[in-house]
């Protein structure tokens, strides 16, 4: 069926790939078109197969999942990559999202519904495992501190635009954009762009690409 979601599996353990393939292919809306055992293979097969979604293991020998994600997105910015990991550390989640992954889910989660996660990612949603999303009761209050212009700048930051590109897009000076960026970070209590992107996506402050 031409309208099925095509998936490339990238994991260095053959048994894991086999298990995930069975899970995904039990869903008639999904077709696994290839398997990769490392990052280099994932990059090559993505170019050959053009899958809708790549299910990428974060930790593989050689070129790991993060590096492979960055390489794929550098040539195909619209690629959808769903990161799988055994680890829930906040730093790793931030690194994956900063690399451009559409989501981050735990391989060992007891309630992992991989097919549903793939469908959500293919539909453009950001998919984050509930256990790696820290509750932030002040999120709504912090968001209300942003002006409409700051919200617009935040969206463009999350879209991956630089200060210079945002300035050109909004017809502002680069210095003005830099001030907006600083004000946004102060309002939301974050200090790095990667943290800002993750925070904004987690709390629905922007529309995911």
Image (cartoon, grey):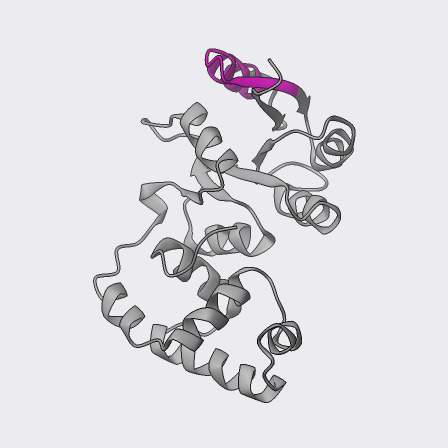
* Labels in figure, total: 0
Task: Look at the image and tell me in which quarter the N terminus lies.
Answer: top right
- The reply to whether the magenta stretch includes residue 26 is yes
Q: Which residue is drawn at 27% across and 72% down?
A: 144
Q: Which residue is drawn at 72% across and 51% down?
A: 74
Residues 189 and 59: in front is 189
In the rendered view, would you say 147 is above or below 23?
below
* Left or right of residue 136, residue 49 in this image: right
Q: Residue at x 35, y 56 (%)?
A: 204
In the rendered view, would you say 52 is above or below 66?
above
Percent coordinates x, y for residue 34 in the rendering: 68, 21
The answer, for residue 172, to whether it is visible in the render is yes
Q: Which residue is drawn at 66% across and 22% down?
A: 35
In the rendered view, would you say 40 is above or below 75?
above
The answer, for residue 85, to whether it is visible in the render is no
Percent coordinates x, y for residue 123 in the rendering: 48, 36
Residues 79 and 134: in front is 79
Q: Which residue lies furthest to the left in this view?
A: 137
Q: Quadrant of residue 61?
A: top right
Percent coordinates x, y for residue 69 in the rendering: 65, 45
Q: Residue furthest front?
A: 171
* Left or right of residue 63, residue 123 in this image: left
Query: Magenta region: which residues?
Result: 16-33
- The reply to whether the magenta stretch includes residue 136 is no
Percent coordinates x, y for residue 171 in the rendering: 60, 80
């Amino acid at each position: 069926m031409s309208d099925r979601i095509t998936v490339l599996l990238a994991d260095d353990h053959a048994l894991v790939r086999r298990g995930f393939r069975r899970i995904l292919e039990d869903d008639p809306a999904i077709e696994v078109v290839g398997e990769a055992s490392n990052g280099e293979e994932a990059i090559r097969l993505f170019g050959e197969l053009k899958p809708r979604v790549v299910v990428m293991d974060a930790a593989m020998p050689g070129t790991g999942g993060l590096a492979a994600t960055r390489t794929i997105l550098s040539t195909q910015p619209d690629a959808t990559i769903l990161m799988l990991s055994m680890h829930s550390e906040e730093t790793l989640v931030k690194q994956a999202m900063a690399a451009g992954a559409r989501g981050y889910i735990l391989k060992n989660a007891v309630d992992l519904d991989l097919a549903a996660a793939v469908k959500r990612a293919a539909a453009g949603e950001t998919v984050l495992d509930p256990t790696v999303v820290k509750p932030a009761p002040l999120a709504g209050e912090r968001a209300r501190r942003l002006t409409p212009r700051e919200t617009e700048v935040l969206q463009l930051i999350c879209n991956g635009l630089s200060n210079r590109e945002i300035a050109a897009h909004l017809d502002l000076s680069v210095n003005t954009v830099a001030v907006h960026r600083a004000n946004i970070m102060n309002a939301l209590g974050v200090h790095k762009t990667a943290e800002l992107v993750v925070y904004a996506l987690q709390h629905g402050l922007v529309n995911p690409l």
